[in-house]
Amino acid sequence: MKSTAETYGGMARLIHWASALLIITLVGSGFRAGFATDPEVKLSAWSVHVPVAVFVLLLTVFRLIWWLRFDRKPGPVGGVPAWQETAAHWTHRALYLLIFVMLASGIAMSVMSGLPDAIFGTAPMPELADLPPRAAHGIGGRLIAAAILLHAGAAIYHHLILKDRTLTRMVSGR
Ligand code: HEM
């Protein structure tokens, strides 16, 4: 369950891949809603996006508790240059920060507009475009998409070009 000095434990891997899948779903459904001109398409994208976002919120709280109270990150993979370790460290920080910004701006946008009443009730669809958190959500959405591409690209580069354990230890724990 727990990580060792060399590799990630089962719980860390489960949290990582569940978060990855859910956050990629959020980026897809978010842009689908953001770019939709047909109100029905927008509403159907919102009804996927908002419940998944609530799940990501709960999973992120659990993730923080897991790392702060129960587990420790493994040490660096041997042979990785120091600048790559530093780049990875800051990309991971940026991802955490962007997840926080997206959750906070999404919640603010929903509270200010009464969005849940339109998704789960019978209220008319609110206009979100003029809300200040909507602008933050749009900028954060583009930045998190870029950070995910950088993060996944680096993992694939380590696996295919450098042929080290960076990706393997997050996939199989070996
Ligand atoms: C990690 C968390 C989240 C991620 C990665 C995420 C991602 C995105 C992205 C990429 C967009 C498209 C932005 C654009 O088109 O400019 C978007 C739109 C949207 N997000 Fe999120 N989001 C998150 C959390 C939330 C939360 C917590 C809520 C509300 C409870 C929310 C509600 C919305 C809504 C309503 C839209 C569509 C806005 C529109 O139709 O104009 N999001 N999201």
Image (cartoon, helix red, strand yellow):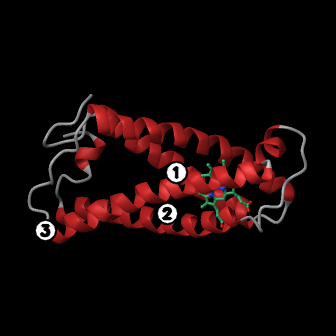
For disc 1, the neighbor class at 10 Å (few under 14, some 14 to 19, many from 20) is: many
Q: Which of marks 2 and 3 is nearer the N terminus?
A: 3
Indicate left or right for 41 with 60 as reference: right
Q: Earlier in the sequence, mark 1 or mark 3?
A: 1
Query: Quarter of the image holding residue 69?
Result: top left
Name, please, the residue furthest toward the top. Answer: 1
Indicate left or right for 167 with 95 as reference: left
Mark 2 and ligand 1: say if the CB distance to the nearest ligand atom is below 8 Å: yes
Mark 3 and ligand 1: say if the CB distance to the nearest ligand atom is below 8 Å: no
Is residue 45 visible to the viewer in this orientation of the structure? no
Position of residue 156 measured from the top left corner of the image (x, y, whole percent): 31, 61
Going by the numbered disc 1, the residue's amino acid type is Ile
Is residue 125 visible to the viewer in this orientation of the structure? yes
Q: Label 3 near label 1: C-beta < 8 Å?
A: no
Position of residue 116 measured from the top left corner of the image (x, y, whole percent): 77, 43
Q: Label 2 near label 1: C-beta < 8 Å?
A: yes
The answer for how far apart the CA atoms under marks 2 and 3 are is 25 Å
Q: Which mark is residue 170?
A: none
Q: Which of marks 1 and 2 is nearer the N terminus?
A: 1
Q: Is mark 2 on a helix, strand or loop?
A: helix
Position of residue 26 measured from the top left corner of the image (x, y, whole percent): 59, 52
- Read off the residue under disc 3: 81
Q: Of residues 152 and 105, which is closer to you in this image?
A: 105
The answer for how far apart the CA atoms under marks 1 and 2 are is 9 Å
Residue occupying the point 79% across, 43% down: 119
Name, please, the residue furthest toward the left. Answer: 79
- Read off the residue under disc 2: 144
Q: Quick one: quadrant of the C terminus?
A: top left
For disc 2, the neighbor class at 10 Å (few under 14, some 14 to 19, many from 20) is: many
| On screen, residue 69 above or below 81 | above
